[in-house]
Image (cartoon, helix red, strand yellow):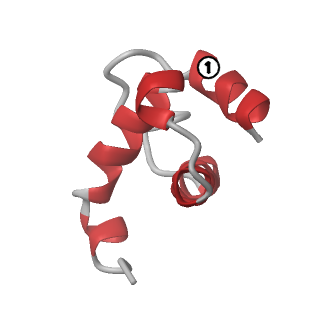
């Protein structure tokens, strides 16, 4: 899982609002869930995947994600 998320991290443009196409897509939802799951398992995404973690933080503040927070 760490290697897969590191690969996703490498694909993210620094400061990007979304993973692809400049808008929310299924890629954002999948990435968001995977990053949250990784942190729950003890994977340090803050240090190891900083672009992934920053994008997740930004998305968490948007209505589609904030309204569905468990």
Residue at the front extreme of this rendering: 42
Q: Is residue 15 above or below residue 2?
A: above
Q: Secondary structure at mark 1?
A: helix
Q: Is residue 67 above or below residue 31?
A: below
Q: Quadrant of the N terminus?
A: top right
Residue in the image at 66% along x and 25% along y:
6
Residue 36 appears at what percent x and percent y?
51, 57
Q: Quadrant of the C terminus?
A: bottom left
- Residue 22 seen from this side: no
Q: How many marks?
A: 1
Residue 48 appears at what percent x and percent y?
53, 23
Q: Is residue 38 left or right of residue 16?
A: right
Please name whichever residue, 32 or 6, is drawn nearer the observer in this view of the structure: 6
- Residue 6 seen from this side: yes
Please name whichever residue, 48 or 64, is drawn nearer the observer in this view of the structure: 48
- Provide the residue designation for mark 1: 11
Q: How many neighbours does mark 1 have within 10 angstroms: few (below 14), some (14-19), or many (20 or more)? A: few
Q: Is residue 46 left or right of residue 67?
A: right
Q: Quadrant of residue 67?
A: bottom left
Q: Is residue 48 above or below residue 45?
A: above
Q: Quadrant of residue 50?
A: top left
Residue in the image at 53% along x and 34% along y:
21
Residue 17 appears at what percent x and percent y?
34, 35
Residue in the image at 42% along x and 37% along y:
53
Q: Quadrant of residue 58?
A: top left
């Amino acid at each position: 899982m760490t290697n897969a998320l590191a690969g996703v991290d490498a694909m993210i443009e620094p400061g990007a609002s979304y993973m692809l196409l400049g808008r929310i897509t299924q890629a954002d939802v999948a990435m968001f869930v995977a990053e949250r799951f990784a942190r729950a398992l003890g994977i340090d995404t803050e240090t190891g995947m900083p672009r992934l973690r920053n994008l997740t933080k930004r998305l968490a503040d948007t209505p589609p994600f904030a309204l569905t927070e468990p």
